[in-house]
Image (cartoon, rainbow, N blue to C red):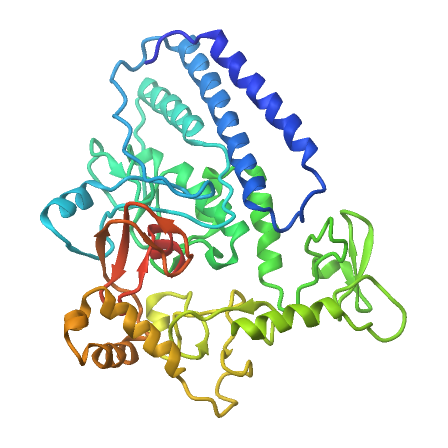
Amino acid sequence: MAGAIDPSERLALQLMQDDLEEFKSLQKGKGRADEPDDFALALQMQSLYLTNQIQSLTDREYCLRIQPQRNTEPLPAPIPKQALPSTAVVAGPSRQARTSAQAGPVIAGSARQPNASNSAGTICKPPVSAVVRSLATASWVDDEASGSTITNDSTPVDEHQDLVCVACDGAYGENLVVRVSCGHVYCPDCLACLFGASTADESLFPPRCCKQPILLDAARKWLPEELIVEFEKKEVEFSSANRTYCSNVNCSVFIPPHEIEAERGYCRACNVWTCTICKSAEHNGACPHDPYKDEILAVAKDNGWQQCPWCQQLVELSHGCNHMSKCNRSLRDCLTNLTDSPVACRCRKEFCYNCGKKWRTCGCGIWNEDRLVQRAEQLVNRGMFGGRTNTDAVRAAQGHIRRTHECFHRSWTFKAGAGRCEECRFHLPSFLFECNGCNIRVCKRCQLNRL
């Protein structure tokens, strides 16, 4: 157990927090509430960091007051962490991956692997592990005094064996982790961060691991109450087909279906009515023409982007066939529908990327040859198929891409070195994972929770 708390440490943290809150108040109104920029996200993460540090001091003081010498076992040394964007959840390589990095690449399935969890716009809630740990310790003391024993319906393991969180690689006792349906283990902090990320990034919703959904009921007791409330709101939003957001650019919050009547939606946050047809402020008569929308669509056409015919969002296809879809169900369900492609709009509707029509209602080819050649050259530049020394390497790579474009990503290989995740586009400075089927390279967050 750590020694006495230095009062100046708490004072310094509180002063830093006050200064940060004052600075944040000066930034209000300078950006859209639903699309915070990198600077706003950095301020949020710094504020959360300071809150976590103050909470940690409070927990330590409480532990020292009730049981000064309860546990003299030193805490494990911190695991080296990979620097990522400020919105990422970071974790160092696991014991298996560190061995793999020394002995060469090793094919890995669902076993423990190094982590590089990251998600754009991810906001992690304050850690709950300190509270959970104190509650678990208190429960153990009560049961020991009463002579009762604790039973658990999960997979039986050695009660003295630490379990390793698949996200942060931290070692925890069995009563301090959550085992999800695929068999992986999450600590309360990482589970809360995954649920928080799913509320900010729809591609992570619903929270899942190895394509298996993580139900809210199974994780509820480990999540902060405010996160549960936000998650339930997002569940309604993300399940709505034709969404309406407040037309007030300084608000832009989602208007739930029960607040819509007669093609008008009422925003309770700012008391503004919005037309559910054109998504602009309420009006009389036919919907007015929106010149800004024409400008956006013109930019999209110049860049080769496509608009989803259902949710109207713009999507960009970097590699793969023209079939826009998503397989976010269990692996068994995926195997019964082999038309699913690894490329998707966030609403997961199926359409042709080339023309924007519903899938299988147009005469477009399944492949764009320029995009196919570009992807083939990327694989050849990695040294695959003989590399640039093989004159037929690009042709061989094209055949490989055609055969594996509907890959289910069953096994992965750890790749040491810096690179960009081909799914979320974040740059990772230390390592990635490469699918042994289609050779896509992704971060740990995308490997476990997005693909």
Residue furthest right in the image:
284
Residue 311 visible in the picture: no
Q: Residue furthest left?
A: 103
Q: Furthest-bottom residue in view? A: 363
Left or right of 44 on screen, residue 292: right
Image-quadrant location for residue 94: top left
Residue 313, percent across and down? 59, 67
Specify the quadrant that holds the C terminus.
Answer: bottom left
Q: Is residue 236 visible?
A: yes
- Tell me if residue 87 comes above or below residue 3 in the rendering: below
- Name the side, left or right, on which 438 lies relative to 245: left
Q: Is residue 67 left or right of residue 42?
A: left
Q: Quadrant of residue 59?
A: top left
Q: Residue at x 41, y 82 (%)?
A: 368
Give the answer, above or below, for where 72 lies relative to 171. Answer: above
Report x, y in % for residue 78.
29, 28
Query: Depth check: 213 or 416 in front?
Result: 416
**Residue at position x 64%, y 32% in the image:** 24
Residue 259 vs residue 96: left or right?
right
